Amino acid sequence: MTAITHHTPDALLAAYAAGSLPQPYALVVAAHISLCLECRAAYEAHQAAGGAVLESVAATDVSEGLKSSILALLDTPVPCEPTYQRSGVYPGPVMGALKGRLPRWKSVGMGVRQCILSAGHEGSVRLLYIPPGQAVPDHSHNGLELTLVLQGSFSDDTGRFGVGDLEVADQALEHTPIADPGAPCICLAATDAPLRFTSFLPRLLQPLFRI
Amino acid sequence: MLAVRDSRDRVAFAELFDHFAPRLKGFIMRSGTGSGQAEEIVQDVMLTVWRKADQFDPERAQVSAWIYQIARNRQIDVIRKENRPMPEELGEDPSAEPEASQILAVDQEVGQLKQALTRLKPDQRDIIEKAYMGELTHQEISAQTGLPLGTIKSRIRLGLERLRHELKDMR
Ligand SMILES: [Zn+2]
């Protein structure tokens, strides 16, 4: 495995720690941190800064009964939340989004498959499966697109992206990622707008395929 | 906090409550939450502190950082009604004795961070507070240049060394 060279920008990490990142991006950042020590260290530094802010705000008196009611609840058993472990190439947070099951791929043509993890007003996040040598069809987007490689690699005008690398593309970048030879490329991609494949499927079909 | 984690010490937990509950309430109300709902969140956060105490690692984080993240997660879960995606936990060896020098190093860094915060001009400080209270978008955060985040950068370097060290021990 090669070293990760493309990392999460600091502003995204700070927003992730503060919880202001939209859910689709938060999933990609959580998955990258799961794979990347450098960004984990940076994330923990932002938590420390958040802790310093928490310590510095003016305290507000709490109601008299709050402490005793919390102390009385300490022994109350609570149902365990499920935690999801890494499975194959899929980091824990991705397995969480998949509810512990492996992805159910849907073909979108040309050998490319996708598995939508969530799609809503905040944007969408999906897994993409791209056979070697195959281009992810031209897509232009509004806003920000995050793509994290989980298996194989792809290259585009801006460089090569291997396992653990995160590509951050904004609307100024019209790029054509192509999966490198070798293993099929699997990546986790989040956008804050529906992907618009510009030369792939007639626009009319897009709602049908949700791409 | 270690007494809470290792010997389930209720007196120590009550002390944690005395220190953090009023700060948590102030912190939560700053983002516009009413007093009643803020106390509900304080209750959830403090109960999580008790229940998940075994996840607290003093070699990597100070209590305030750990509680900060629990509080933000809880606030977000309340607003969104869904869980925030979290990174995998590092699989650590729970039997390993924490190193006093590591804990001290973490405390010192956080001390420096707090000092840096108090030295900020009021408008800079306001931006930092807004950012970590989740009131700024990532675009707004990246538009803030020239904020004195030097201590955060040094914390990142030290944190990375610590994580590498920890991972080496696990192999
Ligand atoms: Zn990284």
Image: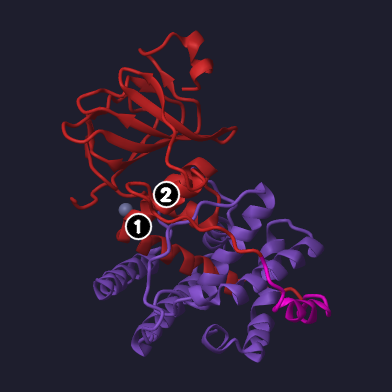
Chain colours: A red, B purple
Q: Quick check: A206 left or right of A161?
A: right
**Is there any visible trace of residue B150 in the rendered image?**
yes
Question: Callout 1: helix, strand or loop?
Answer: helix
Total labels: the figure holds 2
Q: Amino acid at mark 1?
A: Cys
Q: Dividing the picture into quarters, in which one does residue B133 lie?
A: bottom right
Measuring from the top left, give residue A75's x and y in whole percent. 70, 78
Where B35 falls versus A64 (above or below)? above
Q: Which residue is mark 1?
A: A39
Chain at tag 2: A
Between discs 1 and 2, the one toward the N terminus: 2
Q: CA distance from mark 1 to mark 2?
A: 9 Å
The part of the image, by quadrant, that contains residue A73 is bottom right
**Label annotation for residue A29:** 2
Residue nearer the viewer, A128 or A29? A128
Kindly indicate whether the residue at mark 2 contacts the one at mark 1 (C-beta within 8 angstroms): yes
Within 10 Å of the Cα at label 2, are there few (<14), some (14-19), or many (20+) other Cα atoms? many
Asked if A72 appears above or below B121 in the picture, the reply is below
**Label 1 beta carbon within 8 A of ligand 1:** yes
Is B20 placed left or right of A138 in the picture?
right
Amino acid residing under circle 2: Val
**Vertical order, A176 against A20 (above or below):** above
**In the displayed structure, does residue B154 sit left or right of residue B168?**
right
The residue segment tinted magenta is A62-78
Q: Tell me where residue B97 appears, x and y as whole percent.
A: 37, 87
Q: Are tags 1 and 2 found on a single chain?
A: yes
Chain under callout 1: A
Q: Is residue B169 above or below residue A23?
A: below
Q: Nearer the viewer, residue B89 or A44?
A: B89
Residue furthest left as drawn: A181
Q: Tag 2, which secondary structure?
A: helix
